[in-house]
Image: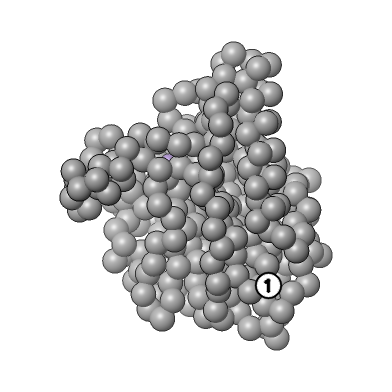
């Protein structure tokens, strides 16, 4: 089963990887996730991605507030956001909600982000076993999101990359239905990011995933490799005209490559 409206949106370019998932419980999650992705995609990233992401998150929040003020139906709409901005040696990560960023390095899967969910708080407080979290009926209940009329409190941190690293950003429509070992195996086996993306979305569907499943996979490669530069915008964020915004930017020693592949269903 799939939702009629895709509430996920994503962006994959040489300087920016991002996934946003419209928050359930209020209408217009698709507008909120699209606002997050198109706002970030419009930012001219500088040598200070942390500052860029901080102002980007503030700009998204202000835009959501404006939309909510103009139309009461949008007054509480919200979205998750997991975004990674490349600086030539690693990423600055901005994260709020329950979309996730993973790293595959030397065959091991590492989760880079912490879910802002009630269930995650229960797990950390020792009141719920980690293994019971994925099937918990309240697992999608967010304690933080980018929401119209609310303060934006995203986690912000830097992460060093290495050539050979493979990164996955995904919405809970993937991570809620495909277990960590399956994610790891898929990322290990896929020769190219596009294969991993397709397989993960297929696995989410096979597992009976009833949510939009969106992911972005990117490889970090050595500087000599020829890298396609065309950014890709998908899901609720697909709007021709914004696609070329990031091309020609970021001539750096290393960059996430091939470029990133992404798909949304
Ligand atoms: Mn979702």
Left or right: residue 229 compared with residue 195: right
Identify the residue at the far right of this view. Answer: 248
**Residue 255 picture quarter:** bottom right
Camera sees residue 20: yes
Above/below status of 224 relative to 114: below
| Ligand 1 within 8 Å, label 1 CB | no
Is 12 in front, or is 160? Answer: 160
Left or right: residue 147 compared with residue 113: right
Is 9 in front, or is 25? Answer: 25
Which image quarter has ligand 1? top left
Identify the residue at the far top of this view. Answer: 72
Residue at x 40% of width, y 43% of height: 116
Is 110 in front, or is 166? Answer: 110
Left or right: residue 208 compared with residue 85: left
How many numbered discs, if any? 1
Rate crowding at label 1 as few (under 14), some (14 to 19) or many (20 or more) other CA atoms within 10 Å: some
Residue at x 54% of width, y 58% of height: 157
x%, y% of residue 61?
Answer: 63, 34
Residue at x 72% of width, y 60% of height: 48
Identify the residue at the far front of this view. Answer: 125
Camera sees residue 238: no
x%, y% of residue 44?
Answer: 78, 53
**Secondary element at tag 1:** loop
Above/below status of 8 relative to 252: above
Residue at x 55% of width, y 72% of height: 160
- Looking at the rendered image, the quarter that the N terminus falls into is top left
x%, y% of residue 6?
Answer: 51, 37
x%, y% of residue 173?
Answer: 40, 46
Which color mode does the image show? one colour
Question: Which residue is denoted by mark 1 in the rendering?
Answer: 88
């Amino acid at each position: 089963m799939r939702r009629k409206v895709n509430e996920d949106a994503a962006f994959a370019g040489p300087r920016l990887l991002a996934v946003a998932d419209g928050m359930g419980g209020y209408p217009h999650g698709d507008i909120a996730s699209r606002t997050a992705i198109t706002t970030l995609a419009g930012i001219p990233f500088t040598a200070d991605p942390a500052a860029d992401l901080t102002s980007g998150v503030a700009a998204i929040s202000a835009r959501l507030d404006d939309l909510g003020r103009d139309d009461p139906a949008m007054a509480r709409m919200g979205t998750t956001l997991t975004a990674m901005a490349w600086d030539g040696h690693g990423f600055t990560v901005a994260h709020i909600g329950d979309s996730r960023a993973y790293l595959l390095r030397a065959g091991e899967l590492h989760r880079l982000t912490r879910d802002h969910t009630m269930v995650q708080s229960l797990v950390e407080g020792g009141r719920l076993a980690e293994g019971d979290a994925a099937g918990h009926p309240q697992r999608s209940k967010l304690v933080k999101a980018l929401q119209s009329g609310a303060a934006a409190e995203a986690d912000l941190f830097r992460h060093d990359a290495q050539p050979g690293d493979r990164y996955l950003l995904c919405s809970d429509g993937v991570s809620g239905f495909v277990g960590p070992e399956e994610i790891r195996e898929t990322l290990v086996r896929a020769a190219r990011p596009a294969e991993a993306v397709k397989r993960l979305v297929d696995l989410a569907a096979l597992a009976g995933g009833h949510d939009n499943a969106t992911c972005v996979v990117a490889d970090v490669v050595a500087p000599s490799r020829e890298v396609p530069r065309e950014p890709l915008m998908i899901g609720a964020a697909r709007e021709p005209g914004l696609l070329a915004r990031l091309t020609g930017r970021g001539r750096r020693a290393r960059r996430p490559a091939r470029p990133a592949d992404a798909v949304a269903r």
